[in-house]
Structure formats: structure tokens, C-alpha cells
């Protein structure tokens, strides 16, 4: 679903290498966490995958399409159809209600207002915020605003969800609620999730953890599938 082939991104006439010959393959429905210190290349990786930046070398493939080879219109269309994004700072429009924020991507695609808001309300109900649909962001808690942002990111039911520190501005209890919601939505939509985080607990909700340093993937850890396999083996042994 997401493939990086020998991808590098350098800035300043090649003096600063944000990513260096990174190769990565993420399959459909897989959840991958990316961790590393500031300046390790995490944000650069997200920007390349969503087409907000181009690699200096190598290729970034989204569902088999080289995103850097697309013109602006086709790139925007691919991003709209294939990629949803969740930001640490929510990026909601302060003057719009929750349902208007969620329906905005549909309205920008010329969907009729009534249809767009009906679909947005359905998605808000799915994330547990149907009763807050007419509230503006300043009338919502941090966790509620993140739920609105998730609903907006999923309004097209994209196969890929990119999450940039989705619990970074939340307390631990609310953060865990958001991670549980992402677990539920992953099961429902089989969404491929790539999450940048500094939170080890958040990363443990994924199948793999990639650790970046100085533009390189220095370590890869299997998480959930290993734990599930161990649990199944233990259960099988107990029933022998």
C-alpha cells in the first residue's frame, strides 16, 4: 500500500539529509509507528508519503502509483481518495461547527451541502460525537476535537491514514481513548495506519515500530502480531 524505494530527501544544496536511502514497505491494513528524536526524518517521511514534498532520489509509491510523477491536480486527487491525515494540533476551522469541519472535504469536491453534512453526521456518530455536531472547536474538549479531526480524515474512507502525534496534545486517559477509537476504526475499515509518535504506549497499538535516527531506519520491532502469536501458542499449549 505504501512503498519507499531508496528514498532520500536533502535540503540546502545537499548539505542537510533529512532521509537517506530509506526503503520501506507497508501492506494494506498494517499499522506502523515511526519513532525517533527531533530531526530524525519522521515529518519528512510523512510529507513525502502524502505528496506535500518530493524525494531528492528514489520513489514513493502509494497503492502502486509514483506520487512524485503526478501533476498537482492528479496528486491532489490521489491524496483526497487514498490518504487521510490527522494532526497533533487538530487543524479544525474555528468558525465552523464539528459537522461543517467534517463535511468540508466533501463540499470542496462540490458535494451538495445536505448530502455532505448527512455523511459528516454519520461519521461523527461513528466516532461518538453525534450529539456535539453543532458545536464549534472552542466548545469541545481536546479529545472531542481530535475525534472531529479523525472523522474528517475518514470522510472518504481512505485506505491510508497518516497520524502525526495524534495523542501529543492530550492527557493520558484521553489519549488512550483516541488510540482505542483508532483500533476500532482499523478493524472496521481495514485502514493502513502510519503513525508518528513519541509515545511508546501509542506505538504499542501498532504492528511494527520503526525507529529513525539521522534519516535512517536504525531498528524495526514487531509488536502486536508477535504478542498475538505468543498468546495463541500459550492457549494451544494450555489445551493440550
Image (spheres, rainbow, N blue to C red):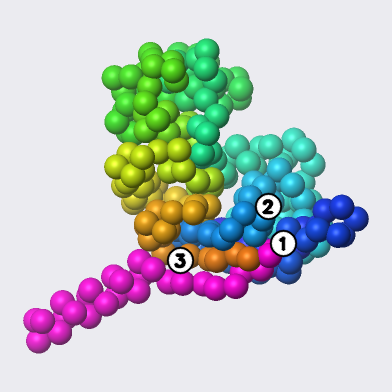
- Residue 34: horizontal and vertical position, in percent? 53, 59
The answer to which of 111 and 143 lies nearer the viewer is 143
Which quadrant of the structure image shows residue 98? top left
The alpha-carbon separation of the residues under discs 3 and 2 comes to 19 Å
Q: Quadrant of the C terminus?
A: bottom left
Q: Are marks 3 and 2 in contact (CB under 8 Å)?
A: no
- Residue 186: horizontal and vertical position, in percent? 38, 50
Q: Which residue is mark 1?
A: 19
Question: Badge 3, how many Cα within 10 Å: few under 14, some, many 20+?
Answer: many
In the image, residue 8 sits, relative to residue 68, either above or below, namely below
Element at badge 2? helix
Q: Which residue is mark 3?
A: 208
In the image, residue 235 sits, relative to residue 191, either above or below, namely below
Q: Residue sitting at 35 percent across and 66 percent down?
A: 224
In the image, residue 10 sits, relative to residue 133, either above or below, namely below
Element at badge 1? strand
Q: Which residue is mark 2?
A: 44
The answer to which of 155 and 230 lies nearer the viewer is 230
- Residue 156 in sight from this viewpoint: no
Reading the chain from its start, which is encountered first: label 1 or label 2? Answer: 1
- Residue 169 in sight from this viewpoint: yes
Question: Badge 2, how many Cα within 10 Å: few under 14, some, many 20+?
Answer: many
Reading the chain from its start, which is encountered first: label 3 or label 2? Answer: 2
The answer to which of 92 and 240 lies nearer the viewer is 92
Q: Quadrant of the N terminus?
A: bottom right
- Residue 46: horizontal and vertical position, in percent? 62, 50
Q: Which residues are magenta?
A: 214-240
Element at badge 3? strand
Amino acid at each position: 500500500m505504501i512503498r519507499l524505494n531508496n528514498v532520500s530527501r536533502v535540503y540546502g544544496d545537499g548539505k542537510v539529509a533529512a532521509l537517506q536511502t530509506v526503503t520501506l514497505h507497508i501492506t494494506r491494513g498494517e499499522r506502523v509507528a515511526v519513532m525517533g528524536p527531533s530531526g530524525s526524518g519522521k515529518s519528512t517521511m510523512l510529507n513525502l508519503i502524502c505528496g506535500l514534498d518530493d524525494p531528492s532520489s528514489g520513489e514513493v509509491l502509494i497503492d502502486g502509483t509514483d506520487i512524485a510523477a503526478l501533476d498537482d491536480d492528479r496528486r491532489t486527487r490521489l491524496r483526497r481518495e487514498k490518504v487521510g491525515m490527522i494532526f497533533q494540533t487538530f487543524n479544525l476551522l474555528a468558525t465552523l461547527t464539528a459537522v461543517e469541519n467534517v463535511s468540508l472535504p466533501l463540499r470542496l469536491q462540490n458535494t451538495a451541502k445536505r448530502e455532505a453534512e448527512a455523511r459528516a453526521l454519520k461519521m461523527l456518530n461513528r466516532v461518538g460525537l453525534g450529539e456535539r455536531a453543532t458545536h464549534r472547536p472552542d466548545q469541545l474538549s481536546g479529545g472531542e476535537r481530535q475525534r472531529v479531526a479523525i472523522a474528517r480524515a475518514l470522510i472518504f474512507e481512505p485506505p491510508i491514514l497518516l497520524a502525526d502525534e495524534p495523542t501529543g496534545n492530550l492527557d493520558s486517559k484521553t489519549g488512550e481513548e483516541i488510540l482505542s477509537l483508532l483500533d476500532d476504526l482499523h478493524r472496521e475499515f481495514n485502514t493502513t495506519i502510519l503513525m508518528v509518535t513519541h509515545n511508546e504506549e501509542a506505538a504499542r497499538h501498532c504492528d511494527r515500530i520503526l525507529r529513525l535516527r539521522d534519516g535512517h531506519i536504525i531498528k524495526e520491532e514487531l509488536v502486536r502480531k508477535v504478542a498475538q502469536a505468543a498468546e495463541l501458542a500459550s492457549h494451544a499449549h494450555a489445551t493440550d
